[in-house]
Image (tube, coloured by chain):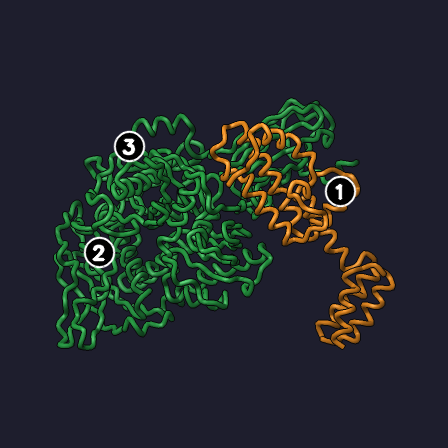
Amino acid sequence: MGTDLAPTEIIALAEIVDDLDYFQILHLPRSASIGEVRKAFHFSSRAFHPDANRHLPSEPRCAIEKIARRVTEAYSVLRDPRRNRAYLQRLEAGKGKRMQLAEAQAEAGRQAVEEKGRTPQGRQYYSLAEADTRRRDFAAAARNLQMALTFEPDNELFKAQLKEARDQT
Amino acid sequence: MTEIGLGIDLGTSNSCVAVVRDGEIRVLANAYGDAITASVVSFKEDGVITVGNLAKANAIHNPRHTVYSSKRLIGRYYFSPEVKKAQAIYAYEICESENHGINIKVRDELFSLPEIGAMVLREMKSIAESRIGQPVHKAVITVPANFNDNQRQATKDAGRVAGLEVLRILNEPTAAALAYGFGKGLKQKVAVYDLGGGTFDISVLEISTDVFEVLSTCGDTFLGGDDFDDRLIDLLADEFSADHGINLRNDLYALEKLKVAAEGAKNALSFHTEVAIRIPDVIESDGKSLSIERTVTTDEFSRLVNDLIQRTFKVCDEALQQASLVTADLDGVILVGGPTRLPMIRSAVTNYFQQEPQSDVDPDQVVAMGAAIHAAALVNKDRSSFLLDVTPLSLRIGVAGGLAEPVIERNTPVPIEQTRTFTTFQDHQESVKIRVYQGESRRDDENELLGQFEFSGFKKARRGEVEIDISFEINSDGIVNVTAKDRETGEQASTTISLSSGLSDLDMESIIREARTQRIEAVPIDDGGNALEPRPPDPRAQLVMIGVMAQTPGGETVAPAVAAARTINLEERPAMNVSSHFVPDLEMAPDDGPTREEVVILSEDGEILGTSDTKPDLDEVEPSAEDLFESPGSDLSGPLDEDQEKG
């Protein structure tokens, strides 16, 4: 266990690790599922976790610590679906390759709210539909979701809920 | 000689040591053949220190100079509520040291908490050395998951004072999961319910073969088995006060007797539905000696402690939520800690998790076993398992308005590094004071202060114009580094957070040089590792006993085996002998007749002072940037969010 890299390679990797995005750090395609993220994290940890590299001399061990911190950072962002999406958007916007967790979480929170409607009307009809669903009145829920979708035709959550409501009726 | 790493569970009430040898996990028993040793240190008049069961037996004669439950105090500030509470109920003297730390005063000597911890660790180390037959220098020591950085550092200091290289401070529930899942090739999600003497922790882990990933951990450092004892003590003391108008809590000796009786009764209630407590001569009043006689049933005890048990499930809710799991997702529940033997806790846990807890795990030994596995993994290069742990508490920076802004949220995997940007609160501010907190409150004073440092050297500017990046780095040892950096000049200052109320390196050196922790009276173990005979008499057996006696069908009471060990030297004030040692001595009863078990209390010379009329049958017992920093005279400002940074 531990890394197969030579000490000089470890040090070199630590130097460029900040130029890698989180998918590159974990050797993952950008389309990776959450399950794949977790597997990749375990795989990288086996190589770079400081516990697995205690026997190294101090300089490469410091480098390993830095790599390990980035591996955990990458995992902490990518393991949550909303944070993961926020990070992809950041990469596509070219805003940098690291994302602080507080920022990722704030962005994820914003998305969670947005999912329930970006427009006041969308949100209104969606919450009516939620109430209908709780009453198990799926026909009414479907009507309200249909209305919500006229304001936000791309809302994935609305679409999924509408399908669900129609299946129930 | 192969290198050996011990696993030590340094508990509030009891400690346990284990080791992995030739691929096998062995729990190392003390001189009395017990897997667990009392975490008690007693100071005799002649300067000799006793540790463990001997010390615990001494508590009743020498309460002022016997230190127990010191884990509740380690790494805490003198002004903390826990310390105030301990001062009110502990018989030994707790006083303030420099920097708001605490010392224990024994006669004219002052001892720091790490020194007391070191005495227990030294005892565990010497037990291990006698059993293994060679010196040991390395160990993994476990702490409650919810311990803060100050408490972890102080525990690490204790290890150093005891002459141990502390390979790792490991969370107790994580260790338990490691012992449970090691080498079994499991793919499971498990919850570890850890109710110790002084703390409660719950951890949720995902085990995938060799990887033990902690998903979340939550806890309550103010809740443990001791609190269950306290409820019984309160019951007995309040009733006594109502009957006789005397508050037993004001008498050290009486209080010690109550304590022992309560603990013994609690332990007996793990096996019996009803237990009789009898404490003769608990106190003298007007030349008359008064006694306590009382029967406690499991139902009554359940009512006394029900709110405490319910409190643990609130914490469980939190942990599951943080792991994004529900109880149905769990493949197993592991119980850790002596109090989890109580049937009322087992049934409450079964009810909450909707499944029976694992029964093949010994709640007293599992933590030390896990620590031993991890110690072996750390001293050997060929690792067969590894741990991915989380930080149990959020790390925060103090900002203006008495607030504390999180930089790393709790349950973030470690090692990790996070940065947030803060700014100045006043025009032309020259320096900022960076205060580092740990805890879950938005208010700074409700969190634990880990340390503080000043940062200056940035340009003087209008408030809000200076941008300071503060980075927190937690390494895999859980040690926190904090760096402050001026974005414009790149000027930086950093500190490694270390216990401000604890020991400096200088203190450590002098403590190690003085070697006070080495005045421990040893109880020899001379078998080199296997045979347990001859074993010295267990000093606890000479004290009053709350336990089970067998009666022959003819009604003749059979004295328990402990009577053999009656050589106690009653120093100081003679007191009746109390034992918390539970002796289910059933083998003396003939097999053919019905047996009645009784709870008896022995006097110091072995005379049976009382027996209960209870008839519990063992088989039938139901387990039933805004503005951030304070410069001198100024206030600070919180983190800048994205918009402000752009603006």
Which chain is home to disc 2? B
- Which of B371/B16 is in front? B371
**Quadrant, the C terminus of chain B:** top right
Q: Tell which residue pokes out farthest to the right in this image.
A: A150
The residue tagged 2 is: B578
- Say which colour chain B has: green
Measured as percent of width and height from the top left, residue B157 is found at: 40, 35
Q: Residue at x 44, y 40 (%)?
A: B378
Measured as percent of width and height from the top left, residue B361 is found at: 39, 58
Q: Amino acid at mark 3?
A: Arg
**Which marked residue is nearer to the observer: mark 1 or mark 3?**
1
Q: Amino acid at mark 2?
A: Val
Q: Residues under labels 2 and 1: Cα distance?
A: 69 Å
Which chain is home to disc 1? A
Left or right of A17 on screen, residue B200? left
Disc tally is 3
Looking at the image, is B228 positioned above or below residue A106?
Answer: below
Residue A144 quadrant: bottom right
- Which of A162/B629 is in front? A162
Q: Marks 3 and 2: CB-CB under 8 Å?
A: no
The residue tagged 1 is: A91
Q: Residue at x 81, y 67 (%)?
A: A145
Which chain is home to disc 3? B
**Which marked residue is nearer to the observer: mark 2 or mark 1?**
1
Task: Rate crowding at label 3 as few (under 14), some (14 to 19) or many (20 or more) other CA atoms within 10 Å.
Answer: some
The residue tagged 3 is: B516
Task: Rate crowding at label 1 as few (under 14), some (14 to 19) or many (20 or more) other CA atoms within 10 Å.
Answer: some
Chain letter, colour orange in render: A
Q: Residues under labels 3 and 2: Cα distance?
A: 30 Å
Q: Residue at x 58, y 57 (%)?
A: B321
Q: Amino acid at mark 1?
A: Leu
Under circle 1, the secondary element is helix
